[in-house]
Image (cartoon, rainbow, N blue to C red):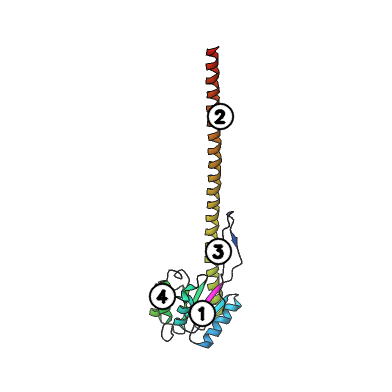
Amino acid sequence: MAVGDVMRMEIPAGGDLTVTPPELHVLAVDDSIVDRKVIERLLRISSCKVTTVESGTRALQYLGLDGDKGASNLKDLKVNLIVTDYSMPGLTGYDLLKKIKESSAFREVPVVIMSSENILPRIEECLKEGAEEFLLKPVKLADVKRIKQLIMRNEAEECKTLRSLSSKRKLVEENIDTSSSSSSHDDSSVKDIQSSKRMKSESENLSCLL
């Protein structure tokens, strides 16, 4: 699946911020093909862009976190949410969560853990490690919609912050232009005064000679 920016926020030279319509990109990880199809369908119904992989190892490869230099060239990869099953062979959902939170590139991406087992210590362990939520299977459409609203709020806050930074930068640039103009005017005034004094001095000297 092709990967693109989900929300592209650009600050042009003029200082005005432009925001393209958001498309949330979700990485879904589950070793069960049935559960993968279910979560993918629910996410697509909620108008999300979805990438599915069958294991924690494949998820790390997709994110470029497996140590493979070739895979880490995905500089433009944008993922808004990672949803992963807890019980998977090899790398578990909990292990994947820890590796994501240790990553400088993806540590801020919300991670949701899914499981068919309601085991309280496991839930507490995941939440303590930084999981956004712990969902019990079968995942419902209401769960997906709630999570999407959470991500949208986070994206809106990010957009608001960028707008504020853009306004501040524009104000600073205007102040610099004003200061530069004022400085130029002051220099001109000083030169006019110096010229006037020089002309007065020459006139006085000429009067003395006469």
Label 3 sits on residue:
156
Magenta region, main secondary structure? strand
Q: Which is nearer the eye, 130 or 175? A: 175
Is 135 located above or below residue 166 in the figure? Answer: below
Where residue 78 appears, as percent x and y from the top left, is: 52, 71
Identify the mark at residue 78; answer none if there is no mark: none
Q: Which of the 4 image quarters holds residue 56?
A: bottom left
Label 4 sits on residue:
99
Give the mark toward the camera: 2 or 1. Answer: 2
Magenta stretch contains residue 154 = no
Which region of the structure is painted magenta?
Answer: 22-29
Give the mark toward the camera: 1 or 3. Answer: 1
Task: Give yes or no for contact between labels 3 and 4 (Cβ–Cβ under 8 Å).
Answer: no
Label 2 sits on residue:
192
Which amino acid, by three-letter code, is at mark 3?
A: Ala
Relative to residue 44, is residue 106 drawn left or right? left
Q: Secondary structure at mark 3?
A: helix
Q: CA distance from mark 2 to mark 1?
A: 73 Å
Task: Give yes or no for contact between labels 2 and 3 (Cβ–Cβ under 8 Å).
Answer: no
Where residue 12 appears, as percent x and y from the top left, is: 58, 57
Tag 1: Cα neighbours inside 10 Å, few (<14), some, or many (≥20)? many
Where residue 155 appears, as percent x and y from the top left, is: 54, 66
Tag 4: Cα neighbours inside 10 Å, few (<14), some, or many (≥20)? some
Task: Give yes or no for contact between labels 4 and 1 (Cβ–Cβ under 8 Å).
Answer: no
Q: Secondary structure at mark 4?
A: helix
